[in-house]
Every structure is written in C-alpha cells, then in structure tokens.
Image: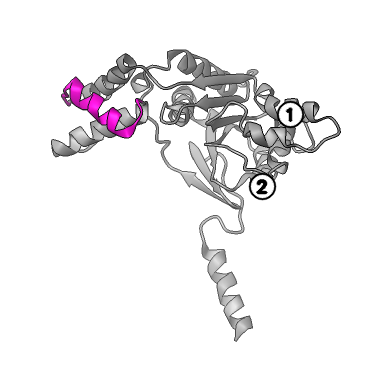
Amino acid sequence: MSDELARIAAALEALLPGAGQAPDWTAHPAYLRDGKTTRGVAALDAPAMALLKGIEAAKAAVCANVARHAAGHAAHDMLLWGARGMGKSALVRAAVRDAQYAAPASLALVQLAAGSLDQVPALFAELAQAPRRFVVFIDDLGFGEGDSEGPRALRSWLEGGVAARPGNVRLAVTANRRNIVPRHLAENDDAVNPRDALDDRLALADRFGLTLGFHACSQEDYLGIVAGYAAAHGLSFAEEDALLWARQRGARSGRAAWQFVTELAGRDRRRL
C-alpha cells in the first residue's frame, strides 16, 4: 500500500504547475521562486513612481541603475536598507516596471520567497542561459545568530566566487540594517583575528555597488505621501486624522500613509 501511495503522490506532484520543467524565462514580467518551483507572474504589482514620495534621491539612483541594466549597460547590485514601511521593496518593483515600459522583453524581476536562499546557485545557472536580463529580488534579508553560511554565500555571489551571479543578473536586496547581520553576531565570529572577522562581516554592504539608506519620514513628508495617495484616488482627508493614525501605529511611514488611505476609501465605500 505504501508503494501505491508513493506512486500516486509522485503522479500528483508531476501535475503541479512548473513541476519537472524549466520555466519560460521570456514569458512574464516577473517570477516568484518558491523552493525549487518557479511561478510566472502575469502583472508586476507596484505603485506609480510619482506616489513614492520622500525618497527622491533613492528613486533617482535606483531607476537609473535598473534602466542601465535593462539596456545591457554596466549596473550595480543594490542594497536598500533602513526603516520599515518606507518604500524599499515598492521602489525595486516600480523601477523594474518602469524599465519594462520602454522594452518589456529586456528585463524581468525574480523574487525569492523567504527561506529559498539555498536555491540561488541553481537559479543563477538557469538565468545565465536565458536571453534576457534579470533583477533577482531578496526582500527583508537578515541572518540569524549562528548563521555563518548565509553571509559567506552572499559575499560569494557578489564578489565573483564559483557561484557568483551571471552577467545578465543583478541583485536587489532590502534589509532593516545596513550591515545585514546583527553586530553582536559579527562580534562573536570565531577567527584567528576577531577584528578581521568583525570587519569582514560588517563589510557585507560594501559588496553592493549601490547602497541606499531609508529613514523614518518627517511629519511633512508623511502628510505629503498621504496627500499624494489621496489625490490619486479622489479622496479627501483631515491632517489631524492622518497624524493620529500614524501616532497610533508608532511611526510615520509610506506604509502607514497607504493604510490610512485604505481606511479612508473603506469609510467612503470605495475600492482602491
């Protein structure tokens, strides 16, 4: 009976989308890599670039870098770090989508699902054979205490090791801290020279050609973000209500602004 169940399970697994076959890397604007399975995404979801406010310098830098990569020119791997909810991942998606407007077939986004870092070498091998350029997106990256392999692998991907990313791929990583690994973890690294180990672990950010910090926005910027979202959807609001919403969530951010506008639309019985 167990052999029969195993055969049935294998047959069902073979029927899953993408099972046992390589994805068509030219068919979609974006892909999600979840474990060993790759799923094409029909439409890349991202806010309009004009609605991402309070991060103007970062917008210009990321858009320019992604556009160069899409055109086949020299471009950097990117690390976007800092405060939560300030548009790091939204900016990556929006920049790729904007680059696709001019030449849809030139570039695609490949987002790695959480816990799929071990799939990166296999993914790179597949993408290297595709007639297209890619931004491999790793969102909210962080390494836990005791994880020495993750930072070492990331360094290898960025610095030309055996498993380095191919020329048609650039990495876009978001993280809460610039150094990606907690400082106390780096300080506990076991090495002949602890200072060298500390410098090595804390210098992960230096491996990225483009490193951009995102910080909690000012009251003025927060209200500007709310106003931009509200105007785009034909909604009105009171500033004191928007500020109260942010205080109740303990932060002023682009995410809080969008959540407030979602609340406004819901009160007004509208869709977004």
Q: Which residues are magenta?
A: 235-252
Disc assigned to residue 97: none
Residue 26 position, x and y percent, is 55, 39
Disc 1 secondary structure class: helix
Q: Are marks 2 and 1 in contact (CB under 8 Å)?
A: no
Left or right of 43, for residue 199: right
The local crowd at label 2, few if under 14, some if 14 to 19, many if 20 or more residues have their Cα within 10 Å, is few
Please give the name of the residue rendered at 44% of the width and 31% of the height, measured from the top-left corner. 84
To which residue does mark 1 refer? 198
Give amino acid for label 2: Asp
Q: Position of residue 50 (x, y in %)?
A: 35, 19
The reply to whether residue 117 is in sight is yes
Q: If the image is split into quadrants, where does the C terminus sit?
A: top left
**Quadrant of the rendered structure where residue 162 is?**
top right
Label 2 belongs to which residue? 118
Q: Residue at x 28, y 33 (%)?
A: 248
Give 263 or 164, whichever is nearer the viewer.
Answer: 263
Q: Is residue 248 magenta?
A: yes
